[in-house]
């Protein structure tokens, strides 16, 4: 705020003040044109879903699939459920899409049944410092998750991260021409880049899934693999689709210049 000015010099200094505001505005606009757009995954990226949440989702999903794939009286056996889960995941990138297309399942019913928890807050495990990280990273941040909105909103609010994201894109809203296309959908990524009017090279996807990172890399995005919560047998740190590998998202500030192509 400008201090109260005395005498004849006030108009001149006020004018200088307006000039400074204009310059600051120009700098802000210039910065917005060069700052990155961060796309953050949620599960096993911002928190440890492998600890309790993923096991619960797997149990819920298997029980729901067994019921749907059964004969109406007897649930389908475990082998049938596992085969269908894998088949649809490989073919569509999400088991849910196969169940919707081939078994008349409603997407909202599938998501609701898979994400039923008795006490979700007690299952969440995350590192301290996430709010400070998101506050320090320049650029807009978007939560981009294949989880449903209600669940992901609860996790964000429990971690007190919701106010640090400019947008929250859950699986229900990942659509292209009216059809649900969650990660690793390349058409949806292209739609997102167009919506935000940003070049792919200024967009950074932070993920634990190599399939999602691979799709993003093919669209020209920068990619960060977070492997700290991934089971050891599934870790592949040196994949060609990965620009930067970190154990924790808290390490992102160490690689900001590299990801944005800036001199240190």
Image (cartoon, rainbow, N blue to C red):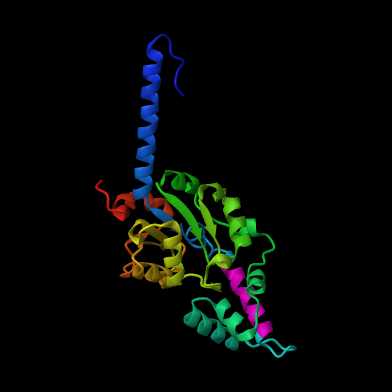
Q: Residue drawn 69% across and 83% down? A: 67
Asked whether residue 235 appears in the rendered view, the answer is no
Q: Residue drawn 63% across and 85% down? A: 103
In the rendering, at what x and y percent does residue 53 appear? 58, 65
Q: Main secondary structure of the magenta part?
A: helix
In the rendering, at what x and y percent does residue 176 appear? 51, 71
In the rendering, at what x and y percent does residue 220 appear? 33, 65
Q: Pick whichever, 255 or 246, lies toward us.
A: 255
Magenta part of the protein: which range? 54-68
Q: Pick whichever, 56 or 67, lies toward us.
A: 67
> Is residue 139 covered in magenta?
no
Q: Residue drawn 37% across and 71% down? A: 214
Looking at this view, name the residue that lies furthest to the right: 73
In the rendering, at what x and y percent does residue 69 appear? 65, 86
On screen, residue 106 versus residue 89, left or right, reads right
Q: Pick whichever, 18 or 131, lies toward us.
A: 18
Q: Which picture quadrant has residue 199?
A: bottom left
Looking at this view, name the residue that lies furthest to the top: 7
> Is residue 60 covered in magenta?
yes
Count numbered badges in the picture.
Answer: 0
């Amino acid at each position: 705020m400008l201090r109260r000015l005395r005498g004849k010099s006030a108009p001149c200094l006020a004018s200088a003040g307006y000039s400074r505001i204009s310059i600051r505005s120009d700098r802000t606009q210039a910065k917005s044109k060069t700052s990155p757009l961060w796309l953050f995954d949620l599960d096993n990226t911002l928190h440890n879903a492998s600890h309790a949440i993923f096991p619960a989702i797997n149990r819920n999903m298997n029980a729901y699939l067994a019921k749907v794939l059964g004969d109406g009286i007897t649930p389908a056996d475990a082998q049938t459920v596992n085969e269908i889960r894998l088949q649809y995941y490989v073919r569509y990138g999400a088991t849910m899409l196969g169940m919707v297309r081939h078994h008349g399942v409603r997407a909202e019913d599938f998501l609701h049944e898979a994400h039923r928890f008795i006490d979700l807050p007690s299952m969440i495990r995350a590192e301290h410092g996430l709010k400070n990280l998101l506050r320090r990273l320049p650029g807009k941040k978007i939560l981009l998750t294949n989880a449903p909105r209600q669940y992901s909103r609860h996790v964000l609010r429990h971690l007190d991260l919701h106010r640090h994201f400019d947008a929250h894109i859950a699986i229900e809203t990942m659509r292209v021409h009216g059809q649900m296309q969650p990660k690793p959908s390349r058409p949806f990524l292209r739609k997102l880049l167009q919506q935000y009017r940003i070049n792919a090279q200024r967009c950074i996807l932070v993920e634990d899934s190599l399939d999602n990172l691979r799709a993003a890399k093919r669209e020209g995005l920068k990619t960060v693999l977070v492997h700290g919560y991934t089971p050891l047998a599934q870790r592949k740190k040196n994949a060609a689709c990965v620009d930067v590998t970190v154990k924790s998202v808290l390490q992102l500030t160490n690689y900001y210049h590299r990801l944005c192509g800036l001199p240190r």
